[in-house]
Amino acid sequence: MDILYLLIPLSVVLVFCILGGLWWAIDRGQFEDIEREGERILKDS
Amino acid sequence: MPIAGSAPLTPIAPHSGEALQLLDDPQEWSAFSRPYGKTAACWESSVVIEGMHCSACSFTVEDAIAAVPGVLQVQVSAGSHRARVIWSAEQVQPSAWMLAIQKRGYRAMPANDVFASERRRVETRKALWRWLVAGLCMMQVMMYAYPAYTAHPGDLTAEMERLLRWASWVLSLPVMLFSCGPFFGNALRDLRRGSVSMDLPVAIGIAITFAVSSLGTFDPTGVFGRAVYFDSLTMFVFFLLTGRWLELRLRDRTAGSLEALMNRLPESLERLNAEGGFERVAARRLLVGDLVRVHPGEAFAADGVVEQGQTLVDEALLTGEYHALRRGPGTKVVAGSHNLSSTVQVRVQALGEQTRFAQIVALMQSASTTKPATAALADRLARPFLIGVLLAAGLSCLWWWQTDPERALMVAVAVLVVTCPCALSLATPAAMLAAAGNLARGGVMVRNLQALEALSSVDTVVFDKTGTLTQEAMVIGAAEVRAGVSVAEALQMAAALAAHSLHPASKALCAASSLPAYAASAWTCEAVTEFAGQGLEGHAVQGAQECLLRLGSARFCGLTRGASDSLRVHVSDAQGWLASFELREEVRAQAARAVALLQQAGVQVHLLSGDDAESVQRVAAKIGIVQVRGACSPAEKLAVLRDLQAQGRKVAMVGDGLNDGPVLAGAHVSFAFGQAVPLAQAQSDFIVMGGQLLAVVQALQLSRRTMSVVRQNLWWALLYNVAGVPLAILGLLPAWLAGLGMACSSLLVVANALRLTASAQVPKGT
């Protein structure tokens, strides 16, 4: 059970890492035109 | 997005190259672009693409722009119909890549709302980010809270419990400091201004919960006990932000489509240059003291004094004066009025903000931000309600303090949270915004949310005829000519005169004269004067031939022939009658069905028109309207409208705004068609794009549904609060349940409103 003393703080750090990743995605506008990338496959060139 | 039951897409008239070149003026760039990167030569422009209907179009447009040398980067969004173009000012001009778009069959408009849409984008990103932070932290805090709920006494060591609380506290910090920012910000602003809003109880509730939980974590032996509520806190914030996020999305969609309406090419006019000639410049470049030439049909871009020429002007939209006013040398003309009859030269006296037009527009803009009456009522009630809530929370806290200080603060929090009038204040705007967004997708712009409320009670719809029930464009039918003159020749003469007027009959003549079937040598006309409502007179010249020509009604041309059953326009010269042309009006395909549907919905339909009674009767019979009045002057139209209103009827007026501006303004609710003059668009409550009459029916049906949703929402919010408060005061409602209840009630209200975004289906058949 002692491992939990490491894992719980680690999970806090992990949440902050995930939040950082989300911020990166939002800041680059990845959630603004969601259909577009999927439809790119229809493009001819 | 294709609209159910829509007419085929109307072809888009391209801009002239000259009009686009106005955009090459660096002064114009700042309206739709901003410098890009560190080098001054690169600009980032935002343009609206018209005519796009699928994502394949966005790739076509993208390729077209990217192929222009000098364009560095381009991105077209199929959803918002906007393109972001980065270009180098040294290598290319905006008109070049706009022409490239036009060559592919689309039309580009500079997006003058670039700042508004950019601000909205930043706002949306931030709101999404706040919401995601709250959501993720909430989930993780729930995990840390779970052992405390399920463990048997003794299972959880004291150290482990403290570690879990510490972890919860750390993850609640971003929620408190970042996600809750708007709540605290608004609450502080309200306190400073001495007002209260629904953010105040929410902020107090959040702050107290966090303080109590923090003390429970770090000082378990203190007066507030060792209870922590991080899970309730983060969940409450997450649900609250979800409601706000949905509301923001809804508002953005509507605001975006409204702002797109404002995108126009810069207004331009002809100015006298140093060489003594006239050149076309953007209105923005005008200076006080310039001499400008204004043609018939154009609007005056500035206040000024006429220096040369005699004309009639239409100031109806500015003053409500519907008679054409005569203006000659030395008299004043005002910006925003229209030149009706002949070309005049005007010395500019006031520009932009100083003109009366700008003042009127500002007035109208402030009027359009007024809140719907029910929302205003909710706001008025909210203040005493909120003060009552704060008092109730304080009193219940005091009362519990005497018996159980550990619970006292959380009871107060429960009262604050459960009574939060979020649902109450969301009830009206959410429903109206959802309806407005729905209408915008169907081609109806709502300029004034209040109008939705008024529209739901409408029981009479008054239509104008020309341009509303019928197509704006008339077509030439049969022609009669004097012996010795060919039809083609007569038509060319008439068209030469008609070119100086904007009357629908004139447009029809001009359109017909360019058909190969009527090819003949062209005439030109000079010294043309328009007699409003009667006809045109001018000197027609072709080579050595010259004559005084009149075009217009039978009486104007000196005819005494018996009235025929169709609409006609006549031409006469010095020798008398020359030719007559029959004009045919095309009734809009949807007109009969729209009228039938309105009558089914229990609405009385009227037709008022300035045209002669017979042709109006004929159109009415075709469409199925019984209450008809033809040959109405604008004053008579207004009188008929007032009569109807005096009988207690709620009247909606549908017109093109060209000569029924005052009537549109006088009706309870007004619809203008998208082709109407810009000011009429600005004045009417609804603007119908693309000339679809069924959209009027849809708007009416949707407004009725909207008001019923608003009523449901208000009742629900009221009942919920009435039931929740006593429970919370008695301590029967824990804070987390209060938070859940409040959030659910907000979500319910928003979800109920979202039902209105489902496209309204007009029943098929008649």
Image (cartoon, helix red, strand yellow):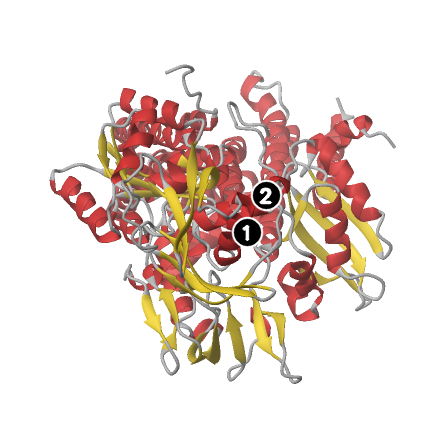
Displayed quadrant of residue A24: top right
Q: Residue furthest front?
A: B484
Marks 2 and 1 on same chain:
yes
Q: Is residue B202 visible?
A: yes
Q: Choose top left, top right, bottom left or bottom right for residue B701.
A: top left
**Badge 1 is on which residue?**
B492
The x, y position of residue B514, in whole percent, is: 60, 46
Which amino acid type is marked by label 2?
Tyr
Determine contact: label 2, label 1, CB under 8 Å: yes
Mark 2 crowd level (few <14, some 14–19, many ≥20, 10 Å Cα): some
**In what quadrant of the picture does the N terminus of chain A appear?**
top right
**Residue holding disc 2:** B518
At which x and y percent is residue B747? Answer: 44, 29
In-image side of B638 versus B366 (left or right) = left
Q: Which residue is located at x 29 percent, y 51 percent?
A: B665
Is B175 above or below relative to B737? below
| Quarter holding residue B142 | top right
Locate residue B464, reporting x and y percent. 32, 41
Where is B500 relative to B120, above or below? below
Q: Estimate the spatial distance between the alpha carbons at disc 2 and disc 1, rounded to whole Å.
A: 8 Å
Subunit bearing disc 2: B
**Element class at badge 1:** helix
Residue B599, placed above or below residue B246: above
Q: Quick one: B234 or B567, which is closer to the camera?
A: B567
* Amino acid, disc 1: Gln
> Along the horizontal axis of the image, is A40 left or right of B3?
right
Indicate the chain on which mark 1 is placed: B
Name the foreground residue: B530 vs B37: B530
Q: Residue furthest left?
A: B647
